[in-house]
Amino acid sequence: MKNIRNFCIIAHIDHGKSTLADRLLQATQTLSERDFQDQVLDNMDLEREKGITIKSHAIQMSYQQDGQDYILNLIDTPGHVDFSYEVSRAIASCEGALLIVDSTQGIQAQTISNLYLALEHDLEIIPILNKIDMEAAMIEEGKDQIVDLLGCDKDDIILASGKTGQGVDEILAAIIERIPSPQGDESAPLQALIFDSVFNSFRGIIAYFKVQNGIIRKGDKVKFFATDKEYEADEVGVLKFNMHPRNEIRAGDVGYIISGIKTATEVKVGDTITHVDRPCKEAISGFEDVKPMVFAGIYPVSTDEYEDLRASMEKLQLNDASLTFEPESSLALGFGFRCGFLGLLHMEIIQERLYREFDMDVITTVPNVSFNVYTTKEDVVTVHNPSGLPAPTIIDRIEEPYIHAEVITKSEYLGAVMKLCLDRRGILKNQSFLTTDRVELTFDMPLSEIVFNFYDKLKSISRGYASFDYALTDYRLADLVKLDILLNGEQVDALSSLIHRNHSYDFGRKMCEKLKELIPRQQFDIAIQAAIGAKIIARETVKAVRKDVTAKCYGGDISRKRKLLEKQKKGKKRMRQVGNVEVPQEAFLAVLKMD
């Protein structure tokens, strides 16, 4: 066990984690030249297209130093704030972390938040200044920032380049010298922590685990602590570029288990595996439960696909434990699920993965956050969905979630960033200059204000320089109203939203204008209205497609034309009473992108 090192790579988005992981895999000859491709660990199509890491990827490397053989278990983690749960799970299964800072950008918000996650778990941190081969690299400034943040010596910082492979040997040496080997007792009862799982249509569910104590062998009878279900370990092995079966996995090592599990709900990330005949006393304290930030409804396009969607969601949840969902129904869309996501990017990725991996076409409703509603009888109702709001007469007050937001930006964009945050009802708490041209702003803001394209706007006004990170703090009193959209007097509950009273008029008007463009014209007039309670605050009309009934009537008295028009008007009125309006999928999506 003293020759095992478990470590992860943490950094802000685009600071070169996956590229550096490539170089480590090449240096330890884990991959053949034929298997190699850039960002080799990002094996999902979506990751390669978007150029981001979505999943943490575990891989084992063998390395020799001073005649000793070492086993290095590396986990490459995502950098985006929406996937921070992946990072926290990777950190819980490691003893050390490589903290990578891009020398052209310096320390950014996600660098700091991932570092704090690692420090909470007492991980040994190895600071690395990456991309030193770039012309814009600010090596000395970068070193000063790291020293300020970590309080380490300048000599402890390793200078590296993921592109050229410079500094990789020093990183490998530092991993072996500085990161402690895992602590555990091979003779104790088996305790193994599940940190990830995938669904394989031939083999069932494959769970990835780290053994804390004991040994797990092929053919052992094992049970899962949380679900109390028993299985036989058909195959155990280690994760290299592919899965390599082994006869046993010992304490301190990372591996996988296949035991022919078919039902997705039986495997929970954070669960403990132990032996049936000699179980451990208690489960390993896993990861804290994930707190969804954004809620949205996901519905199948045709209602008969509801059961297929449920099966797809369960399989997807195996691979992404931060997805939470529960069944719900809607008047407009039928049966579907209320899902909790960690952010808008997470929501987009889930929708895309459902389509690609399970061929499920889905409709997503307007995302919102959860509110606490206090009734006049002092009961508290948690509302995720505007349609679940109690009647206005019995609501005493509504509280909405607030976040503590950190924005790090260049000082030239300070004014624009401040204006954006204050427009979104932010309260400026602190402003401190990290260096002469980098400033850190801390705000208290309502979470509902960052759900809609806040991050995109922040990136565009700061030309991509600002970095953003947030954590939930508490619930505060808010003046919120429920905004309904009516089509011909019928409410479309999928387009309802809870919104601050000051923003409701603007939002309602924009919504009506947008829907007017997107709803196809019918044989009758369609009234699109935005309403708060019984009060209509905005209206647009989609004009009817009409036949020119007066074309055959030339000359003569005007009353002849009027008679024909009146006859047509009556027909349109009757048509409107029986006709119904289909809302196209684009309309639901356009609301998300409305600005």
Image (cartoon, rainbow, N blue to C red):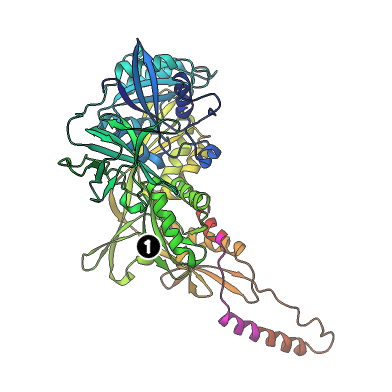
Residue 244: % across, % down: 40, 32
The kind of secondary structure element at disc 1 is strand
Residue at image coords 50%, 54%: 592
Q: Does the magenta stretch include residue 581?
A: yes
Viewer-nearest residue: 292 or 362:
362
Viewer-nearest residue: 40 or 406:
40
Q: Is residue 500 visible?
A: no
Residue 373 in the image: above or below residue 49: below
Res. 176 image quadrant: top left
Decide: few, some or many residues near mark 1? Use Cα within 10 Å; few <14, some 14-19, many ≥20. some
Name the residue beneath numbered marker 1.
Answer: 327
Q: In this view, does 275 lie to the left or right of 88?
A: left
Give the farthest residue toward the left: 281
Q: Can residue 283 be seen in this view?
A: yes
Residue 196: % across, % down: 35, 41
The quadrant the N terminus occupies is top left
Q: Is residue 347 left or right of residue 289?
A: right
Residue 536 in the image: above or below residue 299: below
Give the amino acid at mark 1: Pro
Viewer-nearest residue: 216 or 484:
216
Res. 313 image quadrant: bottom left
Residue 261: % across, % down: 35, 49
The residue stretch that appears in magenta: 570-585
Residue 529 in the image: above or below residue 242: below
Total numbered labels placed on residues in the image? 1
